[in-house]
Image: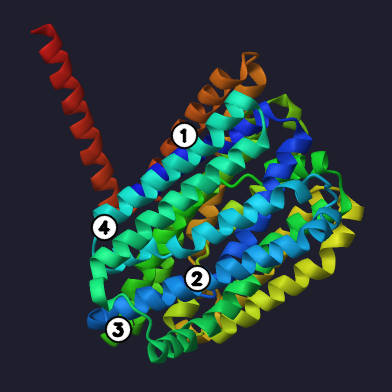
Amino acid sequence: MLGRTLAFAATFFIPVVLARVFDPSRFATYKQLFLIHSTVYLIAQVGMATSLYYFLPRAPHSAGRYVANAVMFLGVTGLLGLGALELARPHLALWLNNSELAHYIRWIGLYLFLMMPSAALEIILIARGQYMWASASYLLSDLARAAASILPVLLFHQLDGLLKGLVLVAFVRAVVALCYFKLEFRREFCLDISLLRTQLAYALPFALSVLVEIVQGNLPQYVVAWVSSPATFAIFAVGCLSVPLVDFAASPTSDVMMVRMQESLSAGRAKEVLETWHETTRKLALLFFPLAALVVIAAREIIVLLYTAKYSAAVPIFMVWSMMIPLATLQVDGVLRVFARTRRLLILNLMRLAIIAGLIQWSVAAFSMTGPVLVILLATLAFKTVALLSMRDLLQVRAHGLLPWRNLATVAAAAAAAGGFALAVKVLLTISIFPLLCIVSAVYVAAYALLVWHLNLLSAGERSALADMVRKARGGIGSVLEYGKG
């Protein structure tokens, strides 16, 4: 987590810098190129990289052959991806309504091809317990990617330099990964067709679910690019800015929830499964409800501060998009996976895809660029609702006991009330964007924290832990002051 957080910090400012250097049309070209890359990159893996999480711990004596199979397979699919992108170059430029794409897609294809063999590097390091090296690999790779993306653009103001720099980084990463695989596994790093069949049998069913997830996640952007100009697409892409704290909090919390649920089921303590679900939902709501409210209140300041006033038209899109944050409170995917309802999860993802595909084009005509976001919200809400209905039988509970309804309502009220205080302060102040954002955020956090404390929304253990943190902080400040006097 630390490695990925630091890696994110290294890459977060890539689009922020590019939005300032490029005009919206050229920035849209950058966003579309990497939309294409991410789509093909994730599909082309066919689940082979992540399958190593399953095979390496179970069969360490065959680890080298499993890794060699995966690397070979990824290299072949990367080559196929390069060829497919080369053939589709003129068609993609036409479909995405951007003639500049045809000039750059070849570089994206080469970047894809070179990245594929190293796609499993951090997975292998983690699966073999080399967590520090995995963290370092995440960080160094993304630092290099950030440098290759930002420096050529600042120096030459050209997209070509960025792409060539990324190809060089991908080449170095591929060489380092292949050298590590050979040194780590030595003679065992060789192909094994019988094991490859086993890997494919495991990976392909999950690849279908991943394919549906990728398509439904990226389809709105492709449709917007198809029906609008590159500059308009840039506005839409900025409006769909994701708040990184959501993923940083939701993913590990869901992982912990699944582990505890699995332990409770194994021990025959079915009641604890529901308690774990309620506790996870309550804690995520304490974070995500106020985060959504604050982001909506400060939407204009966030967009203009990061992307300049050129992208102020993205503010309404960003405000609607922020409504996805409270929905992340309901980690229904994790519950269905604990109960091995992966087929139901696939069906729900297909339902979500059908809603998006059926309504996306109409939504653009009816609501302009906020339309696709509204459709995504509708599809996600339908997904979560149907999943919750499925969970009633799994958790053996009625609708009134499925969620901690009273607690969620109180948290929502506290978030809204704190938002009222922050909004009043924002209206009264007439200062520049950065100090305004800092003051409004500080007022919101203080008001929300006071309401949470006085409404007893924290458990006894959480209140005690926070009190200890405050006491330690006071003690540390006091020691520093005493040292200064001395």
- Of badges 1 and 4, the one in the foreground is 4
According to the picture, the residue beneath numbered tag 1 turns out to be 445
According to the picture, the residue beneath numbered tag 3 turns out to be 269
Residue 410 at what x, y percent from top left?
Answer: 51, 52
According to the picture, the residue beneath numbered tag 2 turns out to be 74
Between 181 and 363, which is closer to the camera in this rendering? Answer: 181
Q: Compute the Cα span from label 1 to label 3.
A: 38 Å
Marked residue nearer the N-terminal end (2 or 4): 2
Between 16 and 482, which is closer to the camera in this rendering? Answer: 16
Q: Compute the Cα span from label 1 to label 4.
A: 34 Å
Residue 95 at what x, y percent from top left?
Answer: 84, 58
Q: Secondary structure at mark 2?
A: helix
Question: Is any atom of residue 172 visible in this view?
Answer: yes
Marked residue nearer the N-terminal end (3 or 4): 4
Residue 418 at what x, y percent from top left?
Answer: 54, 36
- Choose top left, top right, bottom left or bottom right for residue 480: top left
According to the picture, the residue beneath numbered tag 4 turns out to be 131
Q: Compute the Cα span from label 3 to label 4.
A: 32 Å
Residue 451 at what x, y percent from top left?
Answer: 45, 40
Instruction: Please tell me the numbered disc located at residue 409.
Output: none
- Circle 3 packing at 10 Å, graded few (<14), some (14-19), many (20+), is few
Position of the C terminus, as image quadrant, is: top left
What amino acid is labelled 3 in the image?
Arg
Q: Compute the Cα span from label 2 to label 3.
A: 42 Å
- Residues marked 2 and 4 touching at CB (< 8 Å): no
Identity of the residue drawn at 59% across and 26% down: 154
What amino acid is labelled 2 in the image?
Leu
Between 313 and 382, which is closer to the camera in this rendering? Answer: 313
